[in-house]
Image (spheres, rainbow, N blue to C red):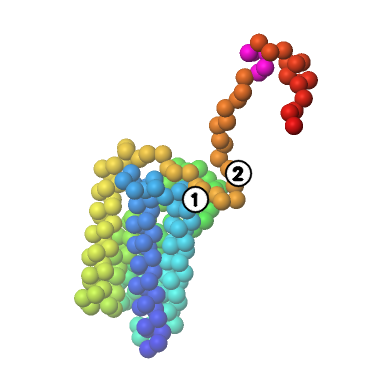
Amino acid sequence: MTTWIILRAAGIGAYLMLFSSVAFGLVATSAPFGKRIAKQSAILIHQFMSTVGLVLLGVHIGGLLLDQYIHFGPTQVLVPGTSSYRPVAVAIGIIGMYSMVLVAVSSWFRKHYSAKVWRTLHMAAVPAFALSVLHGVFAGADSARPWMYLIYVTSATIVVFLLVLRGLTVGLRPARRAQSSPSGPPEPVSVPVMPLASSVGVPVAEVVADPIPD
């Protein structure tokens, strides 16, 4: 019974972290408010959410393997279409799982390939979220509960809204604010330069020889 509760909680947590990661990614790259977030901060927050979601997903799958209620085996949680319990819904969840893993792992190694490749791989985040919604609604043990149904509807509506907003403002993105660094060098300050002595009719030698007044 305890395992069943833990795996359900981990599944809901993984879904919420995936939703948060997708929503934050859309917000951070949309013109109305995305460029208010420093690039490095946005990357770190996004990666943290994805990583936590991946860990919770692992707990969810591990719980399915340990729980004796439905008797999932390694094949049933890794290969789509092999589960006897709601095979279509579970298959959708497995495909969404692979999409989620692809997005999270590609974020860890984004410095090793071009930004174009990373953006292409990262496009799997939205399909992963859509598949997770379908998996949760049709295979989740708590999907019939009003509060869980409200979570699905609200999160899906927010993501759709942010996708539409991103599409409508794709050409209006201003330059991103620079990352502030308290330990970095200070910003250069413009200081007026005094004209050279010889340029105002005073011999340089006289200026140099003139003693500093007491």
Does 58 appear above or below 120? below
Which residue bears the numbered disc 2? 185
Locate the N terminus by quadrant. Answer: bottom left
Taking the view exactly as shown, the residue that stands out farthest to the top is: 201
Q: Residue at x 39, y 75 (%)?
A: 10
What amino acid is labelled 1 in the image? Gln
Q: Residue at x 50, y 47 (%)?
A: 179
Question: Percent x, y for residue 45?
Answer: 45, 58
Which residue bears the numbered disc 1? 40
Q: Nearer the viewer, mark 2 or mark 1?
A: 2
Return the residue nearer the eye: 37 or 204.
Answer: 204
Image quarter for residue 7?
Answer: bottom left
Taking the view exactly as shown, the residue that stands out farthest to the front is: 214
Residue 91 visible in the snapshot: no
Q: Which residues are magenta?
A: 196-200
Locate the C terminus by quadrant. Answer: top right
Asked if disc 2 and disc 1 are in contact, CB closer than 8 Å, the reply is no
Question: Percent x, y for residue 71?
Answer: 38, 82
